[in-house]
Amino acid sequence: MRAVARTGLRTGLMTGLGALVIGTLAAAPATGTAPAEDVTPAVAEARGVAVAARRAAERGIDFGPCPAVESLPKEAVRCGTVEVPLDYAEPDGRRIALTVSRGRATGPAGQRQGALVFNPGGPGASGMWFPLLAQVPEWERLARAYDFVGYAPRGVDRSAPLTCQEPQDFLKAPTEAPVHPSPAFKRERIAEAKAYAAGCARRAGAALRHYTSLNNARDLEVLRAAVGEERLTFYGASYGTYFGALYATLFPDRVRRMVLDSPVNPAREKIWYRSNLDQSLAFETRWADFRAWTARHDSVFGLGGSPEAVGRAYEEVRARLALRPAGGRVGPGQLQAAMLAAAYHDDFWAPRARALAAYLRGDEQPLIDQAAPRRQAARGAENGTAVYTAIECNDAPWPEDFAVWDRDNTALARRAPFETWDNVWMNLPCAYWPAPRQQPLEVRTHRGELPPVLILAAERDAATPYAGARELSRRLKDSVLITEEGSGTHGIGGGANDCVNAHMEDYLLRGVTPVRRASCAPHPEPDPVSLDRRALEPRLRPAV
């Protein structure tokens, strides 16, 4: 399942490939043409990265006004493109243009430390908006020192956009979301997954196989060269931590500083099928956190004074929506998607609880406002899902027999019914994927090979369970793990925790880290009474 940030390779590629890439900078012909002798795919791709990075360093990025479609302020943000090979084994073949945004450092020239490149995760999310964070108080000091550089990875938005079906078909509503689906429902979803995978192959053609996490890491190396940095300063959140870790493995001597926030578990056996099983189990814990918080504020929401009572109220909403979708558009599937956001970020706890309470009192409008699909967002949502699917399906082997999925998730749903089967349907096209599967790269660096990397993680994060942060810290030697204890918000840097932000600033501004690990107390729980409480009160009254 997609790991949404705030606002899952080729066999035999090991750490030594970073040195191989640098070594081939001098050896590769100026045109990028490979020598006549036979070379392995790994060597060909390494040479392709070297050629593409050299070209990007020579050409740079011609930054100018951002296209209107980006909705970025002309005064503060400039946009451009960088070319990368579609296939790094053929750097003289087809190239694609990645869109890039930049906000210049706001401090004096003497304080400038270069470019801070950002990826928000996904797979399938764009970071073009990143320069806007310079105006957010938690990011202002960093913005004085760094150019904020965002970009849309390959396949995303205007960066050689990938699509698998018509946008209007993608956001169909209302839909069902049974926690224990019937055999007939499973057959329907299998047919849909097969059709979706076939649609990806039909629309993308031979290019489909090149949307991978490893190519995202290679693209990051080309982007580093294009923005004129000898070494990369990178902030990756959620899925961005995975290809950030791939980059650190492949190009350790090109890393200056790297923040990996809410890490994906990089173990090869977790990418991506088992990672999603772990995620479904963790979402059950976070769903329980939401119900417990709502119960503690029963005087505000009236959904029940115990987690069990809140759960029963939620099931009542689900049952009613199955019989009569709210506004004709919000059924159990749309409700589930809206509530999943509350499992990612506790910012959503109060508005979601209010919407449930209002619905049970006869006013469905808050729920419609929060859960109904927005037609204007259909194209972006379909594109993001297409990129997510292509990358996760291409990155690693998946079970190709639905009986395996059925066995594993039927058992899991007995323990974790909240999200298990919806997670299956999100990923099931990978069982029928037509493009070649890769074997995940072994993420690992040796002591002294990589500068200290700062890892940020919330102890109860469900989208990227905390065990992944521990695993990543073991694999990236000399890394430092900062844990927000007792919290589950996904994406914690630059957020509500001053302790986490202090560690982030110390590292990015001064290169200072704790010795190995540090902990922060959890940020305050959400205030159940928002500033617009009075405006919502009429909707919270019982229907007459």
Image (cartoon, helix red, strand yellow):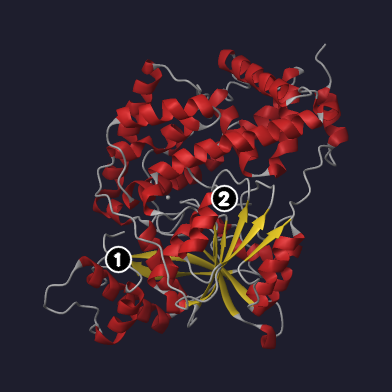
**Residue 412 image label:** none
Work out whether residue 307 or residue 314 is closer to the camera in this orientation and state it: 307
Residue 463 x %, y %:
55, 45
Pick the front one: 79 or 272: 272
Q: Is residue 8 left or right of residue 357?
A: left
The quarter of the image holding the C terminus is: top right
Disc 2 versus disc 1: nearer the observer: 2
Above/below status of 22 relative to 429: below
Is 195 drawn above or below residue 91 in the view shown? above
Vertical order, 223 against 108 (above or below): above
The residue under label 2 is 466
Residue beneath the point at 41% across and 65% down: 444
Tell me the kind of residue under disc 2.
Tyr
The location of residue 534, given as percent across then percent down, is 88, 34
How far across and down, in percent of the image, does residue 291 sit? 70, 30
| Nearer-N-terminus badge (2/1) | 1
Residue toward you, 500 or 78:
500
Asked if one can make out residue 219 in the rendered structure from this viewpoint, the answer is: no
Q: Secondary structure at mark 1?
A: loop
Judge the density around disc 1: few (<14), some (14-19), many (≥20) Cα neighbours within 10 Å.
many
Within 10 Å of disc 2 (Cα), the crowding (few <14, some 14-19, many 20+) is many
Left or right of 469, for residue 316 = right
Which residue shows up at 68% across the image and 84% down it? 111
- Image point 63% across, 67% down: which residue? 74
* Location of mark 1 (residue): 13
- In the image, residue 356 lies at what x, y percent? 71, 26
